[in-house]
Image (cartoon, helix red, strand yellow):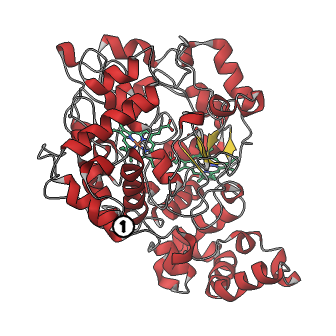
């Protein structure tokens, strides 16, 4: 330990001395957009983010957040009344589900104990992507959501958002989180279930109807018929007089406010260090910080207060599972951002994830291919060989022939492998093992234990009276 700190003495001192000056320094950078020459060549320092403050977020309403909490945990919204948002975004699992690929409706339990169902209830497919953590998504800078950004702010659209529902996206949605909350409802494998099983699944599969409006109307109906919800909706929205006034947009705005209010996270050791508390980071973490903002180049994408540039990049993450494909496509690939934009140059790009609380949100990558932080960090340092060496055996997926047949498909497809690797933009970076350890230690300094299990937490019960996870 002594030797390490001695060797890196000069770098560490620079980082910590200037971290103490961060606030005034950043004010200088941002206000005047000029950096004093003495500091300009300090790559680390120039890349450090500004502190997180309240005004970086959308405002929210407490009554709407309280209603949103109930809705978020209530299985009533799912076709077969057996799964809620919280099943895949749980306070006990740092707002994720702890699984490489999620297990949607039909399963039971949460996290690693979640079962895949059996007989008629066996899940049809795995959820094609990893459930992301929900921290800080209420910040204004999040202008697109989902790994491929398919729900986006779009001022030209009458609804204010570009979404998979295009012109069927309702108006009146207050934030992008509200817009997002409409879509888990409309996924057969996530929440809706199958047409043969329930009214919501039926609306989804009705080839003569409109799947979006059909599903939302059915959910609306359930909320209107659930008497205990009415006073909560009335408290949250003054325009609601009677149950028939409740709409899917009210639902969405309440859930959006809940997610915004529930998972704010900005009290990590990293934040305390940035505010001048020298002891907040260990010596090893300071070395990691220096690498992250300097030689390892992480901050070229993981930048800003939430450690994401909000952009899309192709970094050759291994592709496992059924893949997120267009509705009638049979292939199991996942073209990432291109699935939302249809642009060839967007193939295999995924949104840079925020790294706040990342030490608690394993597995990693859009398909959950890496079980550990070390695995995904080492992938970044040498993406091509990490992709080449990747083994499906390292992924803890519950096995069943119906599901497992699809798991390795893409990694066995030579042409798709070549395309994923050709799109990669990350250049190899050579770090010593102790430097990799320091980077990982720095990522651990992004953990904010005051935030990981949410603010309101798990409700004692939900208005439908259904059991909650
Ligand atoms: C079966 C598991 C599952 C359920 C249930 C579920 N989600 Fe998700 N959620 C996911 C997955 C997987 C993704 C990423 C999907 C993608 O990018 O294509 C996601 C993405 C999100 C995102 C975007 C995060 C980001 O950084 O872009 C939000 C917000 C979210 N979910 C909220 C909700 C809400 C609200 C509900 C309930 C209405 C819900 N989820 C229900 C699995 C689930
Ligand atoms: C070219 C942009 C870029 C650079 C540079 C970059 N990353 Fe990433 N990182 C991404 C993208 C994009 C993803 C998500 C990719 C996916 O899911 O397919 C990601 C994912 C991650 C994840 C997994 C997060 C999660 O929730 O799944 C970690 C951890 C991570 N990066 C750390 C780092 C570190 C440490 C460095 C520096 C060594 C780094 N990144 C450099 C773009 C980048």
Between 68 and 8, the one lying in front of the other is 68
Name the residue at 35% across, 16% down.
Answer: 403
Q: How packed is label 1: few (under 14 Cα within 10 Å), some, or many (20 or more)?
A: some
The x and y percentages for residue 65 are 34, 63
> Which residue in the structure is indicated by mark 1?
451
37 versus 306 height, above or below:
below
Label 1, secondary structure: give it: loop
36 versus 419 height, above or below:
below
Name the residue at 71% across, 64% down.
Answer: 294
Q: Is residue 99 left or right of residue 168?
A: left
Q: Is residue 265 left or right of residue 411?
A: left
Q: Quadrant of residue 20?
A: bottom right
Between 325 and 420, the one lying in front of the other is 325
Rendering quadrant holding ligand 1: top left
Q: Quadrant of residue 457?
A: bottom left
Q: Is residue 312 left or right of residue 242?
A: right
Name the residue at 81% across, 81% down.
Answer: 39
Name the residue at 60% across, 29% down.
Answer: 387
């Amino acid at each position: 330990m002594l030797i390490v700190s001695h060797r890196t003495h000069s770098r560490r001192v620079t980082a910590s001395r200037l971290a103490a000056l961060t606030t005034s320094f950043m004010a200088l950078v941002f206000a005047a957009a000029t950096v004093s020459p003495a500091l300009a060549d300090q790559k680390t320092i120039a890349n450090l983010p500004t502190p997180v403050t309240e005004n970086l977020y959308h405002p929210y309403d407490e009554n709407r957040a309280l209603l949103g909490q109930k809705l978020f945990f209530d299985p009533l919204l799912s076709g077969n009344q057996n799964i809620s948002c919280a099943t895949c975004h749980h306070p006990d699992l740092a707002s994720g589900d702890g699984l490489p690929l999620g297990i949607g409706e039909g399963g039971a339990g949460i996290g690693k104990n979640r079962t895949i169902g059996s007989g008629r209830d066996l899940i049809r497919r795995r959820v094609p992507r990893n459930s992301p953590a929900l921290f800080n998504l209420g910040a204004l800078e999040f202008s697109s959501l989902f790994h491929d950004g398919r729900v986006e702010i779009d001022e030209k659209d009458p609804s204010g958002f570009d979404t998979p529902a295009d012109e069927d996206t309702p108006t009146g949605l207050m934030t992008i989180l509200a817009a997002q909350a409409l879509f888990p409802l409309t996924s057969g494998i996530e929440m809706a279930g199958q047409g043969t099983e329930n009214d919501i699944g039926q609306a989804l599969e009705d080839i003569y109807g409109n799947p979006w409006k059909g599903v939302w109307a059915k959910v609306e109906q359930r909320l209107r018929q659930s008497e205990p919800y009415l006073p909560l909706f009335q408290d949250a929205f003054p325009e609601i007089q009677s149950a028939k006034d409740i709409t899917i947009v009210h639902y969405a705005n309440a859930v959006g406010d809940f997610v915004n209010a529930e998972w704010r996270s900005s009290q990590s050791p990293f934040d305390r260090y940035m505010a001048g508390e020298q002891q907040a980071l260990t010596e090893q973490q300071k070395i990691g910080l220096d690498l992250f903002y300097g030689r390892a180049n992480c901050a070229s994408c993981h930048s800003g207060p939430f450690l994401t540039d909000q952009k899309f990049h192709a970094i050759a993450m291994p592709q496992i599972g059924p893949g997120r494909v267009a509705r009638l496509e049979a292939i199991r690939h996942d073209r990432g951002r291109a699935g939302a934009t249809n642009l060839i140059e967007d193939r295999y790009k995924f949104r840079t994830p925020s790294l706040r609380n990342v030490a608690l949100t394993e597995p990693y990558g859009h398909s959950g291919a890496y079980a550990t932080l070390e695995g995904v960090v080492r992938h970044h340092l040498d993406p091509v060989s990490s992709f080449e060496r990747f083994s499906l055996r390292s992924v803890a997926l519950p096995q069943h022939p119906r599901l497992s047949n699809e798991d390795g498909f893409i990694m066995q497809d030579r042409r798709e492998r070549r395309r994923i690797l050709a799109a990669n933009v990350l250049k190899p970076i050579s770090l010593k093992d102790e430097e990799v350890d320091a980077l990982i230690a720095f990522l651990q300094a992004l953990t904010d234990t005051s935030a990981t299990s949410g603010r309101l937490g798990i409700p004692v019960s939900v208005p439908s009276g259904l059991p909650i996870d």
